[in-house]
Image (cartoon, rainbow, N blue to C red):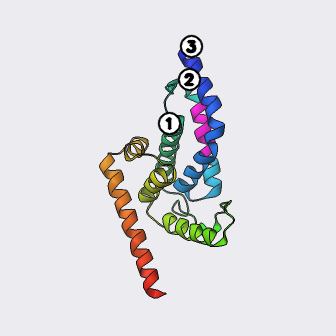
Amino acid sequence: MFFKKSARKEVEDGIKPIFPRLWRYCLVLTGNKDWADDLAQSVCLRALEKADQYKPGTKLDRWLFTIAHNNWINELRKNAVRTSGGIANVDEIEIPDTKPDPESNILASEVLKEVMALPEAQRVAVILVYIEGYSYQEAADTLDIPIGTVMSRLSAARAKLANKLNDESQIA
């Protein structure tokens, strides 16, 4: 019984500090602020309901991200992709940037716009590995896919982004 109590306590105490990262991940999954809010809240609710399934001492953030991924996939299956195809225009998403340098803000916005234009599978891999700092194996475990698939998705995403940058530099 102590084990379950400890798991519940760890989940209850750990959700709040992880929530901003969880919400950002949900935003990348959904591409829409309102949907990200709903998904993040449903993940927290699910985590609290299933807290006894969490293994204390493991990475709570990975467990929550896995729940988010699974909930989103279930939602897509249930609704056969939401009305706008699950992707929102990046220009409509308000993402606060705390950096004071305006050029950095412009570059970050442009990079985010290009990342958000990637196919969902590549976009999710990019956020887990390059933004959240997960290893390829951790990302593969979170998404329940082989590590080679994560590597392939990241490679394809890098190639698309590089081609886009090359195309834009030739125009300028």
Q: Quadrant of residue 157?
A: bottom left
Residue to which mark 1 is pinned? 63
Q: How dense is the environment of label 3, judged by Cα within 10 Å: few (below 14), some, or many (20 and up)?
A: few
Instruction: Kindly identify the residue that appears in the image at 59 percent across and 52 percent down.
Output: 24
Of all residues, the one furthest to the front in this rendering is: 101
Kind of residue sitting beneath label 2: Ala
Residue to which mark 3 is pinned? 2
Q: Is residue 2 visible?
A: yes
Instruction: Kindly identify the residue that appears in the image at 55 percent across and 61 percent down.
Output: 83
Spatial CA span between label 2 and label 3: 9 Å
Mark 1 residue element:
helix
Q: How dense is the environment of label 1, judged by Cα within 10 Å: few (below 14), some, or many (20 and up)?
A: some
Task: Provide the residue span drawn in magenta.
Answer: 40-48
The reply to whether the C-beta atoms of the residues labelled 3 and 1 are less than 8 Å apart is no
Q: Point out residue 115 in the picture as x, y percentages from the top left corner.
A: 49, 64
Mark 3 residue element:
helix
Per the picture, the main secondary structure of the magenta-coloured stretch is helix
> Of label 2 and label 1, which has the lower sequence position?
2
